[in-house]
Image (cartoon, rainbow, N blue to C red):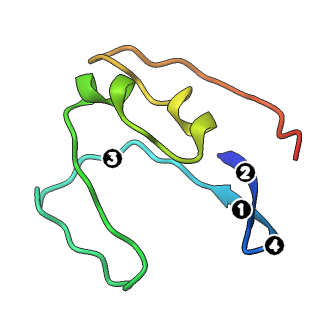
């Protein structure tokens, strides 16, 4: 889980991002929600990608098999 806070259009927002490691059968999934898009990248490209919230990038593996438990406090 990654906790994140941000300001948009003058309003404070707070979200909890639940992150799961999964294996998928359909390599081209589509969203059932208009406001969500999927972008699939090789794990080796994550290090150079603008991932939001930024703290999420710290929990994602940047190379095959490179993962660790991670916790960071939100200072929103």
Instruction: Give the camera-side residue of 23 and 42.
Output: 42
- Label of residue 4 in the image: 2
**What separation in Å lies between label 1 and label 2 (alpha carbons)?**
5 Å
- Label of residue 10 in the image: 4
Residue for badge 1: 15
- In the rendered structure, the answer to whether residue 74 lies left or right of residue 59 reads right
Instruction: Give the camera-side residue of 38 and 64.
Output: 38
Q: Residue at x 73, y 49 (%)?
A: 3
Whichever of labels 3 and 4 marks the residue nearer the N terminus, that label is: 4
**What separation in Å lies between label 4 and label 1 (alpha carbons)?**
16 Å
- Label of residue 22 in the image: 3
Q: Residue at x 30, y 16 (%)?
A: 63
Q: State whether residue 40 is above or below residue 62.
A: below
- In the rendered structure, the answer to whether residue 58 lies left or right of residue 6 reads left
Q: Residue at x 36, y 20 (%)?
A: 62
**What separation in Å lies between label 1 and label 3 (alpha carbons)?**
21 Å
Q: State whether residue 31 is above or below residue 45.
A: below
Residue 72 point in image, percent of width and height: 76, 29
> Quick one: label 4, few (<14), some, or many (20+) residues within 10 Å?
few
Within the image, what quadrant is residue 25 found in?
bottom left
Whichever of labels 4 and 2 marks the residue nearer the N terminus, that label is: 2
Q: Nearer the viewer, mark 1 or mark 3?
A: 1
Residue 65 point in image, percent of width and height: 32, 16
Residue 59 point in image, percent of width and height: 54, 29
Q: Disc 1 vs disc 3: Cβ atoms closer than 8 Å? A: no
Q: Nearer the viewer, mark 4 or mark 1?
A: 4
Q: Secondary structure at mark 3?
A: loop
Q: Secondary structure at mark 1?
A: strand
Whichever of labels 1 and 3 marks the residue nearer the N terminus, that label is: 1
**What separation in Å lies between label 2 and label 3 (alpha carbons)?**
22 Å
Whichever of labels 4 and 1 marks the residue nearer the N terminus, that label is: 4
């Amino acid at each position: 889980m990654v906790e994140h806070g941000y300001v948009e259009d003058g309003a404070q927002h707070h979200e909890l991002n639940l992150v799961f490691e999964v294996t998928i059968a359909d390599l081209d999934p589509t969203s059932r929600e208009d406001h969500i898009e999927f972008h699939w990248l090789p794990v080796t490209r994550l290090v150079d990608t603008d991932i939001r919230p930024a703290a999420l990038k710290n929990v994602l593996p940047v190379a095959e098999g490179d993962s660790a438990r991670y916790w960071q406090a939100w200072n929103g």
